[in-house]
Amino acid sequence: MTELSLPNEFMSSDSDPAANDPQGSLFSLDGPAWETDVHEQITVATVVFSEMPFGPFDYSVPSELVDSVRPGMRLQVPLGKRRKPITGWCTKVTATTTGGMALKPIDSCFDEKPLCNANLIQLVLWMAHYYQAQPGQVFDALIPAGVRMGAGTRATTFFTPTQQALDDEVVAKLPAKQQYALQYLIAAAEPMTLRDLADQAGCTEGPIRQLLQKELIVGEVRRVMTPGILPSRNNVLTDAHSLTKEQSAALAEICAALDSGKHSTLLLHGVTGSGKTEVYIQAIEHLQRFGRQAIVLVPEISLTPQTRQRFQDRFESVAVLHSHMSPVERNHHWQRIAEGQVQVIVGARSAIFAPTPHLGLIVIDEEHDASFKQDTIPRYHARDVARYRAHLEGIPLILGSATPALESWNAAKKGIYKRIPLHRRVGDRPMPHVQLVDLRLKEDRTGGSISRPLMQATRAALAKGEQAILLLNRRGFATTIQCPSCGHVVACPDCEMPLTHHRDGSKAVCHYCDYQIGTPPWCPECRFDGIRYSGLGTQKLEMEVKAKFPEAVIARMDSDTMRRPGSHERVLSAFRSGEIDILLGTQMIAKGLDFPNVTLVGVINADSALHFPDFRAAERTFQLVTQVAGRAGRGDAGGEVVVQTYTPEHPAIQAASQHDYFQFAEEELQQRQKFAYPPFGRIARIIIRGSEETLTEAFADNLVSSLERARDAQQAEIRILGPAPPPIAKLRGKYRFHILLQCPDAGSLGNVIRAATSEHRSGEDIQYVVDIDPLDML
Ligand code: ADP
Ligand code: ZN
């Protein structure tokens, strides 16, 4: 990957005063603005909004608020003709002299203290610039809704004595109870609630209300966490493993980076089972001597109880951030993190925004995983955001993987990242042997989807009391429902994609928009009543496995069986305890699991991701096969992997079967270079969608013209492809077109897109989105 483009300055808010005039008028009612004293010092707050108009707009800060207004807090400000003030994010507070234009004053502060520090504000502005989102929208992504709402907090009034209460003569005249309560409050030297003061001064609330009436005390409303919402846990900490030689060498390099006090990116490239997590943990232990915190990002799917436990066993205070958290829990964790009470934050993508006061290290485990890219605005990649944050904080970033993304691999080759290898598994366990089964050969077929070699291997494992994992990356029962008479394929009316037959409830489901109908008993086109289900999904595989191994206990893990919170954990813990013999499922079972008794992994169809219209198809296939194969042979009983494929000669499958990342990466890099795909240059994708096909296409054509003009004006070296219908040409009833842009450097790519898109607005009928460094090409 080339260096991130770091904008030197963020868009300034003062280029066109008329466009930025939030008042809707340049004149105040007090007379023309230019009569104000031009040398008068004023404080100006720059504010952005998460909805239209996004700003930034400048406001003056009234003198009584000058001490409280700080960047990173929300402010209540007047806007346009709105009658009530609205809430925006303050990005900047500057002292300046009035430039002859009266700014409208802010109304009040919404927050007592900033919700992000200077570095996080800088991160917001960078993300907004780089990913072409509005800063207000990025703030909303950065600060969880639970925190913005103050979930689990309540407004509480705290009392303090007034100036008058310090007058002994006044106090002496008070009735005894009032006098005692007041003296108690003065002695406490901190604000107290009515309830607490009454309790501790041993009186009812009456005397305190009297003090309030006499203006001897005043109340101030603050939001506080509702007590007792989350139990605090007592950890019994366990000891460190003694590291292998390779692990020690890796740790030494990481510690040197930590001690350098500088930013660097380290690629911990360790084969599956090489003990990367232990290295992260000991690096964090090293860091803690300096009282600093660490953020560990893992793919959402890997946030298993096992992962949590590994960290909770070793650190006093760990916050685990996951998507099933309630707003109250989220707010609670966020506040604890902000107060510096949490040593380690483990979470999925958005944990990169954890408000740690003294961040010392960021780790991204399984850094190649696609779940680190967000597919809604702001469409950020947590790896790149992490790099920018680590750069701002001057700290190391560790990227860990057995199959690094080619972007990371290339950056390591160029010396931008430092590569730290772990070539061997812990305990010198061998990598599992991989057998490729050519599905084109008749003698290996069984009439089902499990080949003869896979059947034999499964039988052998079961006979020894060992466990097996079977991967099939498609959920449902049959992936197409087709009429053998007229050829009609039952498809989604909104997406035009074939519906998948789900046997539970006999539904036909669109996997793109979740449209559902009862599976038609006869062809909806020609009424022929012998409609055929073909293509293999996990439900059908489950049936076949049950039939072939009737004595085995089988569990299926895919997004259909894992709907309810906790189901994931239940299945995994049953598998761990040996209650389940065969675990089958989608890529959910491919990642991060560490079960020593799993000796067999079967890949039902390694080609399923190979023929996608996406230049990363081979890379994804290599990663998936390598990762799932890595689940085998983690214990002393060794391991065997059976990979079924129609293209055993494909380089990605060959390399995965030989555990040969280098061979794969070198061949694939040559392919990428030929077509200037990442990591050799940057890409961006613009997706346009609308309910009317021709209008949508015309809009896309116009957008391309603007892009071409901007490219020529800026003399940028950009290839523009499209507009064309993407593989998913219709989604949720909207027609889709996409434009692909390729450019050697991110900076000019961004500039051209910004210039071109400023001429086009998303409207009611047609919307478009810009996706920088897209991972999704569908
Ligand atoms: P990776 O993430 O590289 O695939 P893990 O971190 O899951 O590997 O480690 C694999 C297994 O080895 C885990 O069960 C872990 O507890 C264990 N392990 C790691 N380091 C050591 C060590 N130095 N000695 C013994 N066991 C270790
Ligand atoms: Zn659909």
Image: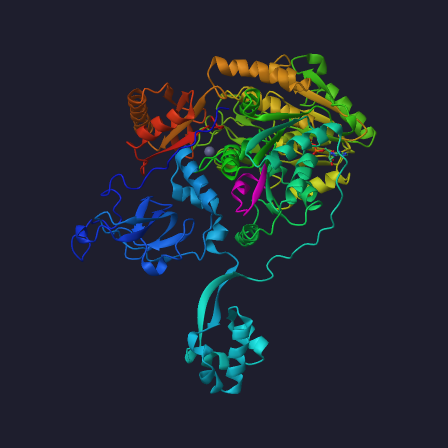
Q: Nearer the viewer, residue 382 or 497?
A: 382
Q: Position of residue 235 (x, y in %)?
A: 71, 51
Residue shown at the point (80%, 30%) measured from the top left: 462
Indicate the quadrant where residue 254 lies.
top right
Q: Which of 739 and 557 is in front in this view?
A: 739
Q: Nearer the viewer, residue 623 or 487?
A: 623
Q: Give the range drawn in magenta.
A: 346-362
Left or right: where 392 falls relative to 647: left
Q: Is residue 773 visible?
A: yes
Left or right: where 76 falls relative to 628: left
Q: Nearer the viewer, residue 268 or 393?
A: 393
Indicate the quadrant where residue 195 lies.
bottom right
Height in image: 399 above or below 431? below
Q: Which residue lies furthest to the front in this view?
A: 39
Height in image: 46 above or below 640? below
Q: Is residue 727 magenta?
A: no
Q: Is residue 350 magenta?
A: yes
Left or right: where 332 falls relative to 576: left
Q: Position of residue 402 (x, y in %)?
A: 64, 26
Residue shown at the point (72%, 42%) measured from the top left: 573
Q: Position of residue 394 (x, y in %)?
A: 53, 37
Q: How is the image coloured?
A: rainbow
Q: Where is residue 452 in the image (x, y as percent from the top left)?
A: 74, 19
Height in image: 662 above or below 520? above
Residue shown at the point (75%, 45%) measured from the top left: 238
* Count of numbered circles on the image: 0
Q: Is residue 476 visible?
A: no
